[in-house]
Amino acid sequence: NDMIDIFRSMGFDVVDGPEVETDHYNFECLNVPADHPARDMQDTFYVSSPNVLLRSHTSSVQIRTMEKISPPVQIISPGTVYRVDDIDPQHTPMFYQIEGLMVAEKISFSNLKAVLIRLLKEVFGEETGVRFRPTYYPYTEPSAAIDMSCTQCGGKGCRTCGYSGWITVLGSGMVHPNVLKVVGYDIEKYSGFAFGLGLNRLALLYYGLD
């Protein structure tokens, strides 16, 4: 609720969508066709093969929203998601996620950085270090993984952060043109960014749980 309040203060609306989804919204519209190897990254549970499944992210809500409204779009979509992950200290088959999307004219990577740096500093304090690393997601290009300085050791290195001083907390990037095309947006006029975070992991850090 605190994070939702922070996003609302930055002008984001909160939207919801179904947890039981179709392959079309969960994968196809997000630049992940049936034969794409990136599907292995988000392998999920199928209700009825091959088209009905438990959503592996709330990005499907972003697609459903963009189909209904024209830019500007500024939303977050919190909710439960499902993946075929082995249970360990950082993974469970069901977890809570908040994803965000902003699409309008002249949206740049600078806008993405401003929003997410503000978010992490609001939650964890102004002294929190934030860094962006190049990575790969099929629905954004360019894409960035976002690390924050370890809350346990302050960046000095400890068991929690694998002695690196950093913990990965978000995935993000500029919305891939193919995703904008599939909802009928003019890619010559509009651009946007998207991000996603697993709230469970942030709660562990926020409350100092081992």
Image (spheres, grey):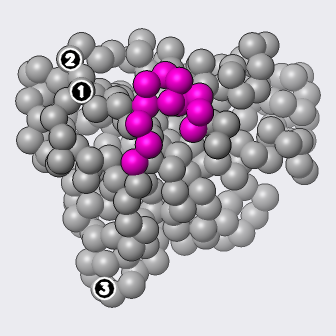
Q: Residues within 10 Å of mark 1 (few under 14, many from 20)?
A: some
Determine which of the numbered discs, if any, sits on residue 72 in the image.
Answer: 1
Task: Give whichever of 113, 168 is nearer the camera.
Answer: 113
Q: Are marks 1 and 2 in contact (CB under 8 Å)?
A: yes
Which quadrant: the N terminus? top right
Q: Amino acid at mark 3?
A: Ser
Marks 1/3: CA distance?
Answer: 36 Å
Q: Is residue 39 visible?
A: no
Residue 191, placed above or below residue 98: above
Find numbered disc 3 in the image and state the secondary structure of the residue it sits on.
Answer: loop
Instruction: Name the amino acid, label 2.
Output: Glu
The reply to whether the magenta stretch includes residue 13 is: yes
Mark 3 touches mark 2? (CB < 8 Å): no
Disc 2 target residue: 105
Q: Secondary structure at mark 1?
A: loop
Query: Residue 33: where, in percent of width, then height?
Result: 23, 60
Q: Residue furthest bottom?
A: 48
Query: Where residue 108 appears, x then y in whole percent?
Result: 33, 16
Residue 11: within the magenta? Answer: yes
Q: Position of residue 147 (x, y in %)?
A: 65, 29
- The reply to whether callout 1 and callout 3 are in contact (CB within 8 Å) is no
Number of residues whose C-alpha sits closer than 10 Å to that of mark 3, classed few (under 14), some (14–19) or many (20 or more): few
Instruction: Find residue 104 and report its image quarter.
Output: top left
> Which residue is painted at 75% across and 13% down in the image?
126
Distance between the alpha carbons at the discs numbered 1 and 2? 8 Å
Q: Is tag 3's residue or tag 2's residue first in the polypeptide sequence?
A: 3
Q: Is residue 29 left or right of residue 88?
A: left
Dot label at residue 49: 3
Tell which circle, 1 or 2, labels the residue nearer the N-terminal end: 1
Q: Is residue 32 left or right of residue 54?
A: left
Which contiguous range is marked in magenta?
4-15
